């Protein structure tokens, strides 16, 4: 009957004084027989709430075509210096330029 009281806040307050350890089980049983059953109240314990779903993964970051990566490097001197020997766009390490764009440039 403690589940009955816990499920219905009016009964929990009246028959348990807001403390499950202090429930008047006999009084709750009488209430159930005389009123609760006919009102369609449930005596079942509340099921725990399911955990929230995990957050959705971020959308994949698109890969830029080589020509766009070279353009990105040529417009950003720090990228050109870091990933393109002799500051030549045709010599760029495009994988590193792509990573830089994903991590820093597109933000």
Image (spheres, rainbow, N blue to C red):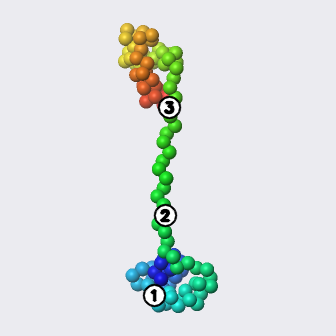
For disc 1, the marked residue is 25
Task: Mark 2 and mark 3 in contact? Answer it, CB < 8 Å.
Answer: no
Q: CA distance from mark 2 to mark 3?
A: 35 Å
Whether residue 9 appears in this view of the structure is no
Q: Which mark is residue 49?
A: 2
For disc 3, the marked residue is 61
Q: Against 99, is 28 above or below?
A: below
Residue 9, horizontal then vertical, whole percent:
52, 77
Please tell me how crowded label 2 is: few (under 14), some (14-19), or many (20+) other residues with Cα within 10 Å: few
Q: Earlier in the sequence, mark 2 or mark 1?
A: 1
Q: Against 57, is 100 above or below?
A: above
Q: CA distance from mark 2 to mark 1?
A: 26 Å
Q: Earlier in the sequence, mark 2 or mark 3?
A: 2
User: Dot 2 lies on which element?
Assistant: loop
Residue 95, horizontal then vertical, whole percent:
42, 21
Q: Quadrant of residue 21?
A: bottom left
Residue 34, horizontal then vertical, whole percent:
58, 90
User: Dot 1 lies on which element?
Assistant: helix
């Amino acid at each position: 009957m403690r589940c009955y009281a816990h499920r219905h806040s009016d009964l929990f307050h009246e028959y348990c004084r807001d403390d499950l350890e202090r429930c008047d089980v006999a009084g709750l049983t009488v209430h159930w027989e005389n009123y609760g059953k006919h009102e369609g109240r449930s005596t079942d314990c509340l099921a725990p709430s399911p955990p929230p779903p995990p957050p959705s993964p971020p959308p994949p970051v698109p890969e830029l075509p080589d020509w766009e990566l070279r353009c990105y490097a040529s417009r950003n001197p720090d990228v050109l210096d870091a990933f393109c020997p002799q500051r030549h766009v045709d010599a760029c390490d495009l994988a590193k330029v792509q990573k830089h764009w994903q991590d820093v440039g597109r933000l």
